[in-house]
Image (tube, rainbow, N blue to C red):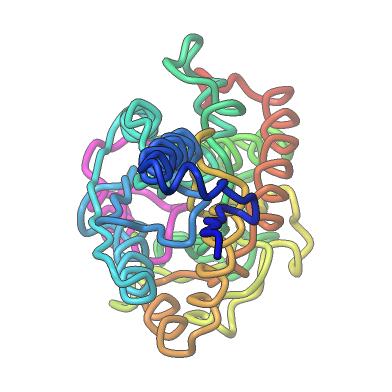
Amino acid sequence: MKTVWKVFDRPIPSDYAKAGRGSAWLRAFARLVALVMIASPISARADWPERQVKLIVTFPPGSANDAAARIFADALGKKWGKPVVVEDRTGAEGTIGVGSFVASQDDHTLLYTVIGSITVAPMLIEKLPYDVNRDLVPIAATTAIVLTLAVSDQLTVHSIPELIAALRNNPEKYAWASGPTVPRYVFSAFLKQHDLKMNFISYRDAAQPQADLGEGRIQALLTSWTASSSPVQAGKARFLAVVNPRRAAVLPDIKTVRELGYPELEITGFAGIFGSKLTSAALRNRLAADVATVCREADIRRKLEAGGHIVLSGTTEELTKGIEEQRSAMSELAKLIDIHNPQ
């Protein structure tokens, strides 16, 4: 009986086998298959990740967004069976971390940053060392940090209309501060739209504004809940509104600025996970599905909400939409104020 070998249903004649040439043919074919596998994106294969995954985070250690990134890293590491190591690369409005990520050229490296890295940075820095549209691929929305408008008890107001009236009656008497970039732009534009004048105070130390709010050295603060809650808890300040598009679990009774009739104060800003242009579509879809699963886990949601976050859907669509909405909002703000030198 003739010996017939088959590879992908294509027979190798028995005389090749008899002559020992079948084995040589198979070895050559195996080498060809190996080369094809190397040339194809590793990320498209089901065995990803093959090693530890690095998550570059554009926030300082101990910050609210860094804490959220570590919660996602831990949960995803358990799901993937490989450690997800967080590397904080901060500074220059997130561009240092983004630049490090883009330079990595590695499908086992992901980026965790806010959408301002995509929408604001190109407006502030003329020549970025990367292209935000080409080099950053949105994968999954994660959380929106809770943003609030708080006022000092020294300013005896309990609503935004009362704040406007107090500022109009006392131009340039009061001072304010904010979180960097988008919160500052939004409140500067709000003051201009309502023909109000306040003195902006800039800080290097992120902890100082809430201390000054409590002591009455500044009278208004637009920043994250985590960076303004201490004077409120001490009874020296109060929240007027949540600035996010929807209410926060950590402040269920505080209405949003849109609910209160001041949508011009709303900030659609949140964090997400990004891949590189080398990340295959198959891997992007898988990552988004895994992040969405993590976002639905009750224990994860409780941890994130307790840390001052609004948990998002974990989808690519929500991240992409958020970027588009903030780009549009920034374009409108740029018509009202000087982005490079806001109040």
Q: Nearer the viewer, residue 200 or 24?
A: 24
Asked whether residue 175 is in view, the answer is no
| 263 in magenta | no
Could you tell me which quadrant the N terminus lies in?
Answer: bottom right
- Farthest residue, direction bottom: 298
Q: Is residue 112 above or below residue 337?
A: below
Which quadrant of the structure image shows residue 197? top right
Name above or below for residue 268 compared with residue 233. Answer: above
Q: Position of residue 199 (x, y in %)?
A: 45, 34
Above or below: residue 95 compared with residue 297: above
Tell me if I can see residue 146 in this picture. Answer: yes
Span highlighted in magenta in the image: 201-226
Residue 119 screen position, x and y as percent: 59, 33
Total marks in image: 0
Q: Is residue 202 magenta?
A: yes
Where is residue 216 drawn, in percent x and y? 32, 56
What residue lies at 56% left-to-right and 43% top-to-bottom?
170
Name the residue located 41 percent from the left edge and 81 percent from the top edge.
300
Q: Position of residue 33 (x, y in %)?
A: 46, 41
Which image quadrant for residue 228? bottom left
Q: Check the image and name the residue furthest to the top.
A: 127
Decide: is 32 above or below 254.
Answer: above
Foreground residue among 146 and 101: 101
Residue placed furthest toward the right: 261
Q: Residue at x 52, y 39 (%)?
A: 116
